[in-house]
Image (spheres, grey):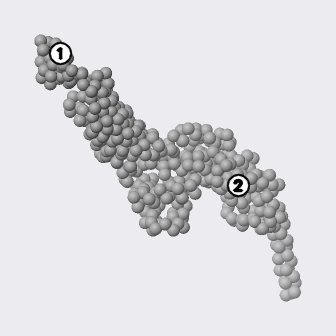
Amino acid sequence: MKAIFACLILHCAGCMLSVAQKPGIVGNTVSMRLHFVQNGFVVDTAFANNGQTLRELKAVLDSPREIVGVTVSGSASPEGSERINNLISARRAAALSAWFDGAKVVSVDTIGINWAMFRELVERSDVEWRDEALDILACVPGRSVADSVKLRLRMLRRGEAWKYMLEELFPELRFADCTITTEADTPAGTEAVGGQPGCAEEASGKGVADMTVCTEASGRTAEAVTPAEACAGEPAVTAVDRPGVRFAVKTNMLYDVVLIPNLGLEVGFARHYSAAIDWEYAWWSKNASHRFWRVYGGGIELRRWWPTRNSASDRLQLTGHHAGLYYQLLTYDFEFGNRGYQGGRWSHAIGVSYGYSLSLNRRFNIDFTLGIGYLWGEYKRYHAADGCYVWDSTNDLRWFGPTKAGISLVCMIGRQGAGKGGAR
């Protein structure tokens, strides 16, 4: 009886071993990752190692082994707003999943801002501020505190840490990756992508469930997006990823006090630069007492900014210290009592400026500016007599010194927010 029982056990074990060794029973799992430029969600074969990755992907798709399932995820870096990062993350996932035409994409995951991997990268780094950054990242940022976490990271070591993260860590978070499970036509562990032996990765053993994710960009499932369609709507996302253009209107209150209405427009561009144009115009007179007050002209200025550390956005906020180059032209006619001074057609000035813009709130700033430069032109001296203006002399005007001064009220134009949005 014991002998019969032993034979049955050996027979069953042999059957189980035979089944386990049959090709196609054990699945192979291969993971691949495509990297993207900041703001990008179109696959670029020339970027990073994408070319090699796509060749390996093609080898898997051309293989006779049946694809059992594919899981795809998209990731973004923390620079921008949560909403835009979720959108760009979904588009990256859609751009990768579109390459599996005819294959079964069973799961698409939109990671959005990849805080978990961000923390891992900081932990592996050897920078001196690592522990400080990890303390800031200790709480898992939800929508209500993510902006606060990013603000504290920007302020860490006077921006030194954030600059390092932008250059060294954030590029690693801009990706879409996939896990491909295929039926093995040889025993697991003996064949890799492209048929090279000894390189196959271990099967993950994870179960996958049918699931589709509707991307915010198009309202369609990820499976339905083709590579050509993956870039649809790119301009709208591109505009918010780059260091955003910022507009402001302003008035110089020093001119307003002396009854010279004026208005200026300033446009921020790149990350630390702005261009401004302004114009003033006044034409007051009271002929009965020979009073005359006429001045009009304007100027342009290019500024370089050193933003305040507590700026919560990569967009230029037009706050903090600034230095610039400016050009002005104006004409004037002032009369005090019976003595008057009338400028020629135009007087000109060029110079350098320095100032500081103080933020009052998200909408308004006060800007203090002083310019030193060279002023040239000509003017006429005259006096009033018997209801007429009598010319006395024409003089050259040459002046080096302060030629520009302003205490300006600045109003920001456009959407205000803590994040620029979209940078990945």
Question: What numbered label is drawn on residue 256?
Answer: none
**Amino acid type at mark 2:** Thr
Q: Position of residue 355 (x, y in %)?
A: 31, 44
Q: Are marks 2 and 1 in contact (CB under 8 Å)?
A: no
Circle 2 sits in a helix, a strand or a loop, which is it?
A: helix
Residue 390: give its label. Answer: 1
Identity of the amino acid at label 1? Val
Which label sits on residue 53?
Answer: 2
Q: Is 334 located above or below residue 59 in the figure?
A: above
Q: For this rendering, which residue is in front, 116 or 124?
A: 124
Q: Residues within 10 Å of mark 1 (few under 14, many from 20)?
A: some
Task: Determine the secondary structure under disc 1.
Answer: strand
Q: Residues within 10 Å of mark 2 (few under 14, many from 20)?
A: some
Q: Quadrant of residue 287?
A: top left
Residue 210 on image: x %, y %: 67, 53
The quadrant of the picture occupied by the N terminus is bottom right
Instruction: Name the residue: 28% across, 22% down.
Output: 344
Give coordinates of residue 31: x percent, y percent: 69, 59
In the image, residue 177 above or below residue 295: below
Q: Does label 2 or label 1 sit earlier along the sequence?
A: 2
User: Residue 55 at x, y = what percent?
Assistant: 74, 53
When the figure is inspected, residue 402 is found, relative to residue 118, above or below; the finding is above
One can see residue 272 in this view: yes
- Tell me if 45 is positioned left or right of 309 in this view: right
Instruction: Give how far apart the Cα atoms at labels 2 and 1 are.
Output: 85 Å
Res 317 seen here: no
Residue located at (65% from left, 39% from top): 229
